[in-house]
């Protein structure tokens, strides 16, 4: 080997170092890409779960929107109040109607508590 061959070895070493650096950068990029793919999958799973929760909540809201007929204002209730009589049957009927309303309000409160 003569003195003129050294620049070739120098260039070869330079290329070898550059290739090693590029391989390291490629491995780092692949690692980051794997992490991003895992995060993307996790986010997609979270999104699907949240969409399912939204659908379930929408169903609950639709059910709650359908107010039962027993909760609607009763003509008997206003009749009882307007009669303003104090007999035992009327008071018992009023208590029964109030119990129905209180039960329905309790059900609504429990439902709203489950939404949070």
Image (tube, grey):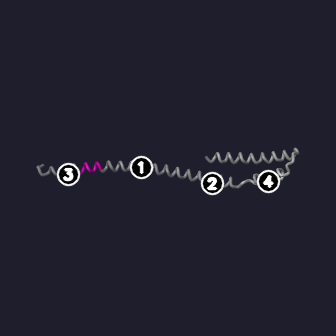
Q: From the image, tell me which residue sits under label 4.
A: 74
Q: Give the Cα separation between the discs numbered 1 and 3.
A: 34 Å
> What is the CA distance from the residue labelled 3 to the residue labelled 2?
68 Å
Q: Main secondary structure of the magenta part?
A: helix
| x and y, in percent, of residue 70 in the image | 77, 52
What residue is at 77 percent from the left and 47 percent from the top?
100
Look at discs 1 and 4 and give the one toward the viewer. Answer: 4
Badge number at residue 58: 2
In the image, the segment drawn in magenta is 15-21
Q: Earlier in the sequence, mark 4 or mark 3?
A: 3
Is residue 55 shown left or right of residue 18?
right
Q: Nearer the viewer, mark 2 or mark 4?
A: 4
For the residues carrying marks 4 and 3, which lies nearer the camera in this image? 4
Residue with the mark numbered 1: 34
> Foreground: 49 or 15?
49
Decide which of 46, 2 is in the foreground and name it: 46
Residue count near mark 2 (Cα–Cα under 10 Å), binned few <14, some 14–19, many ≥20: few
**Residue 23 pos. (x, y %):** 31, 49
- Residue 11's disc number: 3
């Amino acid at each position: 080997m003569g003195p003129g061959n050294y620049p070739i070895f120098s260039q070869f070493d330079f290329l070898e170092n550059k290739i090693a650096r590029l391989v390291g950068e490629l491995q780092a990029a692949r690692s980051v890409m794997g992490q991003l793919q895992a995060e993307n999958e996790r986010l997609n799973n979270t999104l699907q779960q949240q969409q399912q929760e939204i659908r379930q909540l929408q169903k609950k809201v639709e059910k709650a929107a359908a107010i039962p007929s027993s909760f609607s204002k009763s003509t008997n209730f206003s009749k009882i109040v307007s009669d303003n009589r104090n007999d035992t049957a009327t008071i018992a009927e009023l208590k029964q109607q109030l119990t129905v309303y209180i039960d329905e309000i309790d059900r609504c409160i429990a439902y709203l508590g489950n939404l949070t």
